[in-house]
Image (cartoon, rainbow, N blue to C red):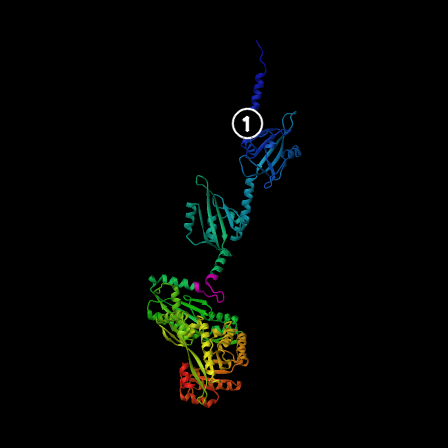
Amino acid sequence: MRKHNVTPIHFKKSLSVGFFDQIHQHIADHARDGLILLSSQLTPLLINQTAQTYLGQADLPNDIFKRLKVYTQKRNHIQFDLKQWLQTHTPTKNTNFKTNMLWIKADNQKALIPVIFQLSIIDTPCKHSDNQLLLLIQDQSSQIEAEAKLCLMETSGTGQFITDSLGFITEPNPIFMDYTGLDAQTLRKTTYIDWLKEQVIFKVPFGLVMEALLEEGHWSGEVELSTHNAMPALLNLSMLTDENRNIEHFVGTLQDLSDIHQAHHKIEQLAYYDRLTGLANRTLLHNQLEDILAKHPLHQSYSGLILLDIDSFKIINDTLGYAVGDELLTLVAQKLNTLIDKQHLLARMEGDEFALLFPDISQDASEALTQVLSLAYKVQEALDTRYTLEHRSLHCTVSVGVYLFKEPPQEGYSDELIRYANMAMHEAKGLGGNQVYLFEDRLCNLAKQRLEMLQALNHSELDNEFQLYFQAQVDTQGRLISAEALLRWFHPTLGFISPGTFIPVAEEGRQIIKIGLWAMHKAFIQAKVWSRNSPKLRVSINISPIQFHEHSFIELVIGLIKFTQVDPNNITLELTEGVLIRNTQLALQKIQHLVSLGFHISIDDFGTGYSSLSYLQKLPIHELKIDQSFIQHIPNNQDDVAIVNSILTLAHNKQLTVVAEGVETEEQAQFLRQQSDTLLMQGFLFSKPVPATTFEQQFL
């Protein structure tokens, strides 16, 4: 019988080794980290699937160190010599080595993967075998992501928390703990529902919040955190579940909205409130009016709009300065605030104009009118007082316009309501101020006429429509001394329009500059003609403050002198005290220049303006004109008599000529003659204003 050889044993042994190698490979392939088993000569003995993904294409050289692309810097792609590192850091028994963070270009991956290499020694059981090296490639992506998320939670600026599946707050970030005033240990014993019920005030029912969270997986909305420092916040709640809808976590974020609310408040203040007084502005008033008009079909109530304007505020601004004007506006706003109730809206429109909105007064027209007028008179009387401004006492009054409305105006806009109240206010101001005026439909017709007049002035033919009339100024013996040139307008369709009607409109629209230049030109020519036979006769010409303050006024006057060849000694320029209010120093310089040219200067309507008597010390004037309002009641009114006597005494001391205008009765003339034998008189008693030819026939 033949003896069996040992080949089968060798076969079994090799089969066993191959089998165990397969097991090792199988186990290694299930490892999450990359594993490369190396011989002491750095020959690869085993490479798991994860490590294979870090190697290049299979057709590259078999040298794994050429296939494994490792970088020390992610951006600059500076390569890391892994083979040299292994040779330099060959571990001894029980000693491991780790690299710093490196970057690997994985197969079929665009982005570089952060890794750390760990080198370990494996003892081999065979005496004659060298120890093997195990190279562990640990992917740090998850670690970096976790650290980033942790950093985000800590530095995001929002409070954040994560719960476990039972809803207990396990991971609160520091900001969340700061917002709630609770430490981590306390929060871990608290469910998010308990926290919500204890510290969060919702603007919607709590049940709807939980219903949305459990059914839709998230809820977001603005809440108020009721801790020791109550704050508005944006709360976001999310529910995280697995594929079978089992709850894993709840996640919440809490964002402080205090800064946003403050920013919104500042924006609202800028958009809807006046900076100086803190009152509502025109925009907010418009919005409130629109709301009232929109609700009209439901309420059917009358509402009232009151507009008021400080009388002569511009003069206060011009003489005392804008700082004093602003202080006065602030004091008026404070006083108005004490007069109104919470349901009223008090607004500063612009400048010195204020508005009071009195909504939903009553459905009864008579009762509503009584209440709104009562409030208007209450305001007017309260503001008729003295104010202390920069150590000076100043008396102020207001003009008040009232408009009562229920239905939207014909045009349907809030602008119309304001316009109607504004018309009433201007009517009150036109009547002398310091009074209340209720809107009337006729004011719309007057406004329409005013617009027509303005358009007519813009297109007027001066030589065809305007004429100069002249009124005599005589001495106490009735002798002609001078004549005042008065402007008359005869429009082809509107007919005769009195100066008291069209001059304010022309000044407002600045057409007075063109008209005033035309009037000066005609008056200069007439004075030149009359001076041939009456060399001492003067012609007085009214100069509008608008015209006087034009930058080129002096140059235009000099041009007219050269063109007409008039002698300025035959011309008296009449200025109102108002020209001194605006830019006093420049006005004085202009007057001095006119005097140096030879003109005589007269202050018209003396005593009705607001200039200081100290101006008279500086002004090189020649004449004062007593306004007709002081003449018409003498000698019976003792107050007017006192004023006239005071002006005459002042003029006598200053050696000024005095002209009393508006003399209509012999009784007035006789009284004036008794007071002074040097004054001049002007009025219907001696002559009405007449054209130049008629004036020549009567006096020359």
Q: How many marks?
A: 1
- Residue closer to the observer: 52 or 633: 633
- Residue 282 highlighted magenta (yes or no): yes
Q: Is residue 694 something one can see in this rendering?
A: yes
Horizontal and vertical percent position of residue 342: 42, 66
The secondary structure that most of the magenta stretch takes on is loop
Horizontal and vertical percent position of residue 255: 50, 52
Q: Residue at x 56, y 21 (%)?
A: 15
What range is drawn magenta here?
A: 269-283
Taking the view exactly as shown, the residue that stands out farthest to the top is 1
Q: Is residue 59 above or below residue 366?
A: above
The residue identified by callout 1 is: 23
Q: Is residue 19 left or right of residue 344?
A: right
Q: Quadrant of residue 300?
A: bottom left
Horizontal and vertical percent position of residue 444: 36, 70
Three-letter amino acid code of the residue under disc 1: Ile
- Residue closer to the observer: 91 or 661: 661
Q: Is residue 545 above or below residue 98?
A: below
